[in-house]
Image: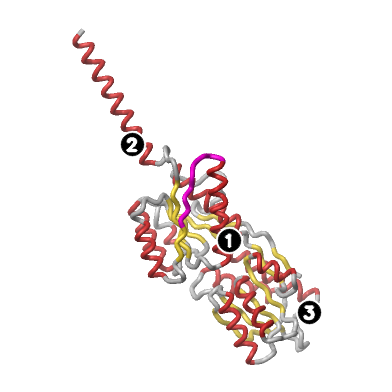
Amino acid sequence: MKKKKTYLICIAAILLALLSGKIIWDNYHGTEKEAVKVAVFAYKKSDVFISDIIGSMEKMAYTYEEETGIPVQIDVLDAKENQNDQDRQLDKCLQLDYDVFCVNLVDRTTASVVVDKTEAEGIPLIFFNREPVEQDIKKGKNVYYIGADAKGSAVLQGKMIADLYVKSPEELDLDKDGDVEYVMMEGQMGHQDAIIRTEWSIKTIRSAGVPLKAVESGVANFDRSQGAALMEQWLQKGDDIELVICNNDEMALGAVDAIEKMGIKKDIKIVGIDGIADGIQAVKEGKMYGTVICNSKQQGESMFTLAVSLALNGEPDKSLKLTNERYIRAELDGLLSQ
């Protein structure tokens, strides 16, 4: 009888140990999580497109909590275009028990360092909008990228101009000299999307037979006020500009601001990329010729879904369409033109 009692006590102790181990395991791996904490690092929160992406995430968080009862805390940190500040923000958040980092780098060449830091702490990492090189993405086990198809958006932008020229060449060649004089307003030096958009927009237009003639090009850092300053500077040099090609809508809107400020009545065609609300409105009002809609809403929703699934399950949700296991490319919503 004594042996039987001892045997039962041993069995009970083993079961208790196994149960305790399971609880510890579940809590450690997040299957029993009561909340999800996501840190979002923005290169510049005032960038309208970035703000739209984050806003889409925040709306998803509200809906998700309503449906599941699991709150998702999204903390946004604004680097204000300062990489040193972003580095400090990252280092601080590494100590604050976040489940996932979503990083919009100030300088994409720092991606490797960010991967090393998050990997060391076991934190899943999602880069967005500013694409690191593939080597940096593949460096970590749990590193992903979400963004628009830069080449696709540039091709659509170029096609918009090419189609206009085929339909009504006089609307672009305003002085009827046989050339379409254009200026190119580029995003940020070294920014993957800026490089690709600049290259493929021009390639697409030229391949359609449009006689482009470059007048000026310059960097305005995806910023409306810088775009306005650059456009005003170009306009003061002469009146030969017929087309303004911009890597994003904010710079295109800056070009509109400069033209209005200087009282220029010439019908200069201005095109952008992103499809932000102000850009779409400017097209409808005839101030911009067109924009490519890059679907910030879908990018934010995809990032939210990926972040939560990584936090709770340790892997991407099966509803997400990944390319090469690490990339999510938001679908382009087409273009809007006059």
Q: Earlier in the sequence, mark 2 or mark 1?
A: 2
State which quarter of the image contains the N terminus: top left
Checking the image for residue 24, the label placed there is: 2
Task: Say what amino acid the circle numbered 1 marks.
Answer: Asp
Residue sitting at x 31%, y 31%: 20
Q: Is residue 325 above or below residue 111?
A: above
User: How is this picture coloured?
Assistant: secondary structure
Task: Say what amino acid the circle numbered 2 marks.
Answer: Ile
Q: Is residue 147 above or below residue 85?
A: above
Task: Say what amino acid the circle numbered 3 marks.
Answer: Pro
- x, y percentage for residue 247? 60, 72
Residue sitting at x 53%, y 75%: 221
Q: Is residue 72 magenta?
A: yes
Q: Residue furthest top?
A: 1
Question: In the depicted view, which residue is nearer to us: 70 or 169?
Answer: 70
Q: Earlier in the sequence, mark 3 or mark 1?
A: 1
The answer to which quarter of the image holds residue 337 is: bottom right
The magenta segment = 67-75
Q: Is residue 198 magenta?
A: no
Checking the image for residue 52, the label placed there is: 1
Checking the image for residue 169, the label placed there is: 3
Question: In the depicted view, which residue is nearer to us: 38 or 197?
Answer: 38
Q: Is residue 28 above or below residue 88?
A: above
